[in-house]
Image: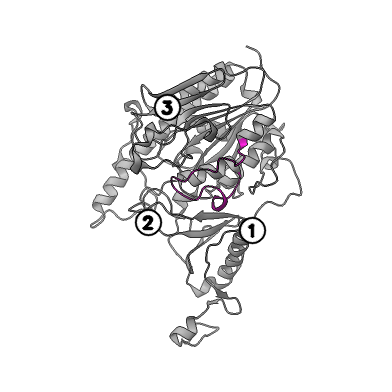
Amino acid sequence: MGRETKKTNMIWIMADQLRADMVGCNGDPNVHTPNIDALAQEGVNFYRAVSTYPLCCPARGTMLTGIYPNRCTLGHEYRMPVDQKTIANVLSEAGYHTAWIGKWHLDGAHEHMGRIAFHHVPKQRRGGFDYWMGYENNNSQFDCYVHGGGEGFGEISPRKLEGYETDCLTDIFLRYLEKRPKDKPFFAVLSVQPPHNPYVAPERNRNYRGEELKLRPNMLPEMPPYEEFNGRMRANLANAYAMIENYDENVGRIVDYLKENGLYEDTVILFFSDHGDAHGAHGQERKTNPLEESIRVPFIVGGKRLSENPELAGIRMPHVLATIDIAPTSLGLLGIRIPKEWEGCDYSLLCHRKSNSFSYPTSAYIQNIIPEHHTHSVELPWRGVVTMDGWKYVCLEGTPWMLFDLNQDPYELRNMALCGIAREKRAELHRQLEGWLERTGDKFILPKINFRNDLYEDTRETFGYPYYEEDDGI
């Protein structure tokens, strides 16, 4: 079959709770992901990408709108503003047929009101997509229900998928590609719940054993009182890897379809996740914390060749692209004007490997506005910056919390937030964080710092301690 369109199509392949290092191309020693790795080997891998807000609903609202969570989707089970322009609206206006298949989690439904799997998302709250087949939220991968439709596709009430969620949603995605209007370019999103907990995978993918996994150095030691914790984390990790392997198989199915139907060279593929998963690092589980395992996400641009020089394939970009930058970068890759109210950055020129004088952000702003109360993760609001030169600075309300030199300490084993040795860097990053709050209209309360000596105000007055320029002799 010949190519059906000369315009560039775009596909988002979106995971939930997949952290950056848990794919082979980013160095994971345990998992088998040949199809995801192939996308990275042929395209561009932003290996230091971060989640603007490591929690499902806010991250998703930001991805679709290019607007920071404090002005869009504030927290868990918060509805995305109905009148907020999404990337689907922009692309529909540009002549694209748009489709969303899978997890939505932007309609503000609450679990305490009944199982969200049966919640119906009305047409006017589906983000402007021409075709929408999905569900609000569902944490049961073998008991997944979808509803929706679109013009020319009909509308269906919730129906149960006959099989594992990722496999079945990929089936629906491929059917959409087959039946879509052929007179338009397409923008299609596949959004699946795995590898989000509960950590359950098809039997064919359960090839991982917790006791055989190579763990990160910041996992708790396997001794009392953490023996039960580590056993649970190893089991969860093994099952999460099985879920990722299953997802990789389905990525391969999509790529094969595009190649078999003459669409691969006309389609840009973005592979990413909304946030990561601590999986036991520092004794934390899941997300909402600013640790590397929670905030780092894969972000790979593959598919259509973006550079005429084949030697530039497989490039690894060190820029701290954030999930707020996904929509603007997508429009940039398609050559479509970005709405002026969007706050994210367009990284498309880097994907095209074009030299330019554009000044990219030197840091990414990360938020936790209204925390989701996970038992083994952070339940307080925080704000932070992650810099391109390898530093992270995070504050709780009114107090510093984390300061890490990720170049020397990638597993965050030495927190220097209150150490005098990092006084200058702390002041520098604090100024950056202040700038981000001002730029985004965020009303979060930062600690007050006297930059003359970088002591938090009131410290000497409260405790009556003298201040010394040198530590020697104190």
Give the Cα separation between the discs numbered 1 and 3. Answer: 39 Å
Residue, disc 2: 282
Q: Characterize the local packing of mark 1: few (<14), some (14-19) or many (20 or more) Cα atoms within 10 angstroms.
A: few
Q: How many marks?
A: 3
Residue, disc 1: 439
- The answer to whether residue 213 is magenta is no
- Residue 146: give its label: 3
- Tell me if residue 81 comes above or below residue 422 in the rendering: above
Q: Position of residue 6 (x, y in %)?
A: 71, 21
Residue at 60% x, 76% y is 451
Q: Amino acid under label 2?
A: His
Give the Cα separation between the discs numbered 1 and 2. Answer: 32 Å
Q: Characterize the local packing of mark 3: few (<14), some (14-19) or many (20 or more) Cα atoms within 10 angstroms.
A: many
Q: Amino acid under label 3?
A: Val
Q: Position of residue 247 (x, y in %)?
A: 44, 31
Check contact, mark 1 vs mark 2: CB within 8 A.
no
Q: Secondary structure at mark 2?
A: loop
- The answer to whether residue 81 is magenta is yes
Q: Secondary structure at mark 1?
A: helix
Indicate left or right for 25 with 223 as reference: right
